[in-house]
Image (cartoon, helix red, strand yellow):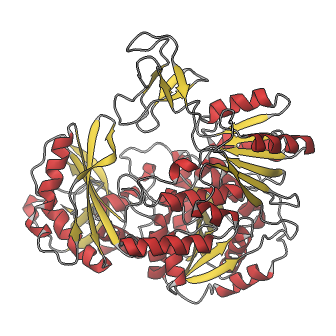
Amino acid sequence: MPVLRVALDLPLHRLFEYRADDASTADVGLRVRVPFGRGEKIGVIVEVVAEGEWPLDQLKPAGPVLRDAAPLPADFFELCRFASAYYQAPLGEVVLQALPKGLKQLDPPARRAGRAAKPPRPLPPPALTAEQATAIDAVDIEGGYSAHLLFGVTGSGKTEVYLRLVERCLAAGHQVLLLVPEINLTPQLEERVSARFPETRVVSLHSELAEAARERHWRAAASGEAAIVLGTRLAIFTPMPRLGLIIVDEEHDASFKQQDGMRYSARDVAVVRARQNAIPVLLGSATPSLETWANARGGRYGLLTLRERANREATLPAVDLVDTRKMVLREGVSPPLADAIRVRLERGEQSLVFLNRRGYAPVLACPACGWVSRCKRCAANLVLHLADRRLRCHHCGFEHGVPRACPTCGNQDIHPFGRGTQRLEAWLGEAFPEARILRVDRDSVKSRKQWESVLERIHGGEADILVGTQMLAKGHDFPKLTLVGVLGADSALFAADWRAPERLFAQLMQVAGRAGRAELKGEVLIQTQYPDHPLFASLVGHDYEGFAAGQLKEREQAGFPPYAFQAVLRAEAPEMAAAIDFLTAAAALPEASGQNDVAIYDPVPMRMARLANLERGQLLVESYSRPALQAFLPRWRAAIEALKAPSRLRWHLEVDPLEL
């Protein structure tokens, strides 16, 4: 009797066996309903064998094999097996997390047909610059595997390069997967792609889609009906039978790294998938991650460069530093920035004031006794949101109303300290009463419909001053925007995280790139108390290459990635002692001793030591050899799984962590 080996969405590194009377190897990749414990689960058939690991009489019979979708293909399982092995994640979790929710439900709701989309207005392609043409010709669609970094300044026309390569790929009969980091970038790009290819089925895949729509789009991609798939990180696992090209836009963005469940990098998985499928992959960015830049400079990736803006009338904005050490700031805004905003209002142009901190103020405090609005569940402060009079934790979501007086001493004169986008918006409204001010952050824009409305208002000239967080920092083209003012950049200069300078530089370069993208000249004013810092010198000169060279030299001297490879074991428990004891026991395992090529550091509390009522610790593992680290991790993980841990302790292993 055939035996099914089934992947289930469980945190266990094994497949589950069931007997089946009428199964065959043709059923590999199909979903199956199986008994598990006292209930049932939906699993995926990974293997059909004549004899399993368990005696046949000890196996439960499988339920019906579900044949309402084509079986998952062999290359899908190959990619999932890689991700499972590399990221130390159970194969069942990897396989099942890649499926839409409707395909994992025991009793899915009735499927509905999608609404017919309004046909887009076709857009003719613009003329190419010489640099764009060279970049396009360097990517051989039919030449097998190749990886390229498209390094182009903001506004250099990277998207047009993508579209021309998509055109070539479609002409060859292939599908294209285009990944973007943020959901709010998808509608604008989807509209542009659909307008360029009006006769082609284009679908999007991201978490904000309704489940029915996501399943329809996934099925269209998996069947080959959809030729172009736009998606966020999870779309990298979508089966596509005719896949011929993968594009990763803004490849440096941290959003491509999954931070819970299976902690994978969609950018890195994209490169692996391209190699497995023998197709090209293109990584695009104005500020590439240092890992990608090192690969390109070292010859592992091809380097394609766009140094000038695609609009010949547009030039890179002038970046100036505003030394605030001897200035009186009004709600964080310096006199030179206020004057520059006033000039833009007189000209009828738009300004963007960038502050990457939402809410009204980072903290509410009592000057009499020193009380501050700390979160009861986290090692963080509650942020004041004055619009709805709430104190909110931006880490765990806890919130409550603003107290009328200090909870400790009863003082009624409690004050907000620091500033967020809401407070900045209020002050700008007072300073420039004639201006139309539009705040764009996670509090004001929570859905795709709201985002589309905001973009329509900006493009329609219905806003004079934009107040925004990193939501506005990338991927957007606002022709009337000529001034960008940056507040609060200094806080990241001396952060404990060694990746902080890279993130800050990328963020500032991206937001600066919003200015002057049409014929109007752009200007960027960065307020700082450290105008002599080398990072700002590189920004003023638009010198990513110089900044990257300096950072890579420092990392090589310190033994940080990309010159070393890391994994981190994290544990969380109601008490820190329990988490640290568990990590100490993991470091003392026999499998962890005598490792010449792998260094295991002492366990320490995480920077955010308490989150959602749990204390958190971590243990860093590092090696100068990726193969040595990968050989060590499975043995160590298996030994950790055998450790006896407190019932309320949870742990996970993350490979290539972005945050320590």
Foreground residue among 145 and 121: 145
Farthest residue in the right direction? 347
Farthest residue in the bottom direction? 143
Name the image quarter holding residue 347: top right
**Residue 128's spot in the image, x, y percent?**
81, 77
Name the image quarter holding residue 171: bottom right
Left/right of residue 412 with respect to residue 587 in the rendered view = right
Left/right of residue 266 with respect to residue 457 in the rendered view = left
**Residue 110's spot in the image, x, y percent?**
49, 43
**Residue 268's spot in the image, x, y percent?**
45, 70
Left/right of residue 118 with respect to residue 419 in the rendered view = right
Q: Is residue 652 above or below residue 127?
A: above
Would residue 560 be visible to someone looking at this image? yes
Residue drawn 60% across and 82% down?
Answer: 303
Residue drawn 40% across and 28% down?
Answer: 374
**Residue 437's spot in the image, x, y percent?**
76, 35
Quadrant location of the C terminus in the rendered image: bottom left
Residue drawn 15% across and 41% down?
Answer: 647
Would residue 562 be visible to someone looking at this image? no
Foreground residue among 315 and 448: 315
Name the image quarter holding residue 558: bottom left
Q: Is residue 487 above or below residue 535?
A: above
Q: Is residue 55 above or below residue 385?
A: below
Q: Is residue 254 above or below residue 86?
A: above
Residue drawn 65% across and 59% down?
Answer: 510
Quadrant location of the N terminus in the rendered image: bottom left
